[in-house]
Amino acid sequence: MSDLGDFTGFSKDDPEEYDPDEGGSDGTDTASEAGESDRFEEVDVQVPGEDEGIGTLSASAGLAVSEDPRDTSLRAYITVRNRSSVRIGSYLVADYPDGERLFARITALEYTQEFYADDATEIHARRAMRQSGIDEQDYKFMAGLEPVAVLYDDSGDLKRRMTDRVPKPETVVRPATDPEEIKTGLKMPSDGVFLGHLAVGGERVRTAAEPPTIDYRVRDDYGDGDPLVFRHTLVAGGTGSGKTHAAKNVLRQYLGRTYPMDDGRSPELAVVQFDPQDEYAQMHDDNPELDADTARRYEREGIEHGGHDATVAFVPAVGSATYAADHHRAEQRRFTVPFSMVRSNPWLVAGSGLNDNQYGALRQLLDRFFDSFGSEGTYREFTTFLDDPALREELHESGRVHEATFDAVKRRAYGFGSVFDQDAPPVTELVHEFVRPGGLTVVPTYHINDSRATETVVLALSSLLVDQKLSNDPTYDRVKETPLVVGMDEAHNFLTDAESVQARKVIGKFTEAAKQGRKERLGLFLVTQDPQDVADPIAKQVNTTVVLNLGDEDAISAVNVPAALESKIPYFEKGQMAVYSPDNSEPVEILGLPYCLTRHGRD
């Protein structure tokens, strides 16, 4: 075990006296070894009473607390019987004489020699090779500590402040096993949206309380600021790390939660999730692997579980693609993207190759088209409009659009015939069903084989939501008046930084949405295995970053977590996560739930 629960099982028996081995492997002894034996026999470790804690603070190499972390020196001597259970990352507490407490984290472990001796000798090596174990009383075992906070009592409430005083030498250090101490020391809220359990080295931190774990929750009220759901979340993890499992569990906690709006209402949150792998519509169904005892335990811990009935799969009609869904029971609604949506977002048909001059020409052509055909104009009519040679000649001779520019726009505007105006209701007529307070809308795109079509559908719908949220004169009040989370799996495919006009327009739109999220009750929930490809202006607006296993150095660097957690990420097992949320807590490691709280997987 590598969590703090091991500390509670430490023996309180007095250490046994050291009984040195007599002689070397050949039955002889050296003068120096004889001298060492004499000194060992003189050491008296028999002290009446029972041990408390796992060791004491040592001033042998200095004991200092400084504003500059490089000048801070906190080391604890760990007694022999407690050494096997100590882990880097474990949390410890040391009391000050006046009742205040130092809350610290183990950052280094080191053996040093107890007595002056050379243990790199043939005799020592062969003796160790023939023994069943090592006599650790020959060595000091020192733990380097990083001070996290000073805990103090304020009229009955436990509070924290920066470490501003040094503890005394030989102060007993004990494992942090009190939930209030741990949550206060790490600035973790007691209430909010459940993400997982506090962990060290992949093992849950254990306490003497019930339940014996420490739940990690994200602040979700307006008491000390805005709910962090509207300050955006990024979930990053490689293939097989469990990121979709984790993302579904987090989203399940948000469903059913209410948030006050400026008009005094408190509607339930709506979630719209773009789903390239067709996994999130399963949130409609219960997980058959979740047994009754586990479900009751989750209920006691305030963890929402079970299928969400108000889940609807909004299936985009694209060309001849068909959607088969025998792996979930969610209601399905087909829709199409009307070409009228391009009027306010011309970049939807700009593709990735138009430059600024060509984009300006595209806008002119679209304006002229919609002025003639109105909002009912279709994509097919637009392509016919572009095929008119008289139009090309007129624009060229007037000097408004050069003929080469016209041809470039025309080539890139073609190829969207399978996306717009298909045989299904336009999404603009379904907004009231698309965004539902308390509802989960999933937009699966797995059945679409054309990546360009997929990108257009996702950006068209997400832009519709963002535009309505940011508008002072919205067309659809339902969007404006409902707290909303827009979830995007494989976000790196849609929100990537690039030099094209389309990319700049998309990034600009979503950056503004991220900045205005708190005010407009709009949260972005981004899931990706390539966080380095998510545009930096958007990534900088994310407050809560959840990182599972990542093996790529560029990806790890992009998530921008502290070095102490960053070095652990490549070694994370499935479900292990680092959480970096500066406005919620200190950076911590957590362990997700072993069960998905809704149905998950194709079986």
Image (cartoon, rainbow, N blue to C red):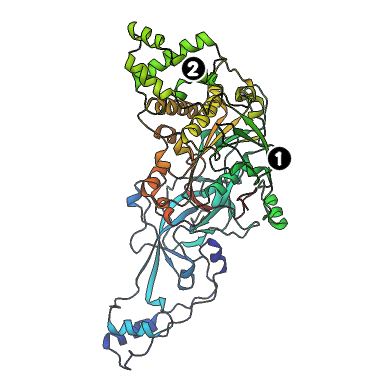
Residue 58: image x %, image y %?
39, 63
Residues tagged 1 and 2 counted as in contact (Cβ below 8 A): no
N-terminal of the pair, mark 1 or mark 2, is 1
Task: Kindly report which numbered mark, 1 or 2, lies closer to the viewer in this rendering.
Answer: 2
How many marks on residues? 2
The residue located at (36%, 19%) in the rendering is: 407
Residue at image mark 1 = 309
Residue 250, horizontal then vertical, whole percent: 59, 44
Q: Residues within 10 Å of mark 1 (few under 14, many from 20)?
A: some
Badge 2: few (under 14), some or many (20 or more) residues near its Cα, within 10 Å? some
Question: In the displayed structure, does residue 163 sit left or right of residue 11?
Answer: left
SS for dot 1: loop
Residue type at tag 1: Asp
Amino acid on which the number 2 mark rests in the picture: Phe
* Direction bottom: furthest residue: 27
Q: Is residue 122 above or below residue 590?
A: below
Image quarter for residue 207? Answer: bottom right
Instruction: Tell me if residue 520 comes above or below residue 153 in the rendering.
Output: above
Q: Residue furthest top?
A: 398
The residue depicted at 46 percent of the width and 20 percent of the height is 346
Secondary structure of residue under mark 2:
helix
Nearer-the-camera pick, 70 or 357 = 357
Residue that label 2 marks: 382
Kindly tell me whether residue 486 is visible in this rendering.
yes
Q: Position of residue 302 (x, y in %)?
A: 67, 47
Quadrant for residue 133, please give it: bottom left
Relative vertical location of residue 491 with respect to residue 425 in this rendering, above or below: below
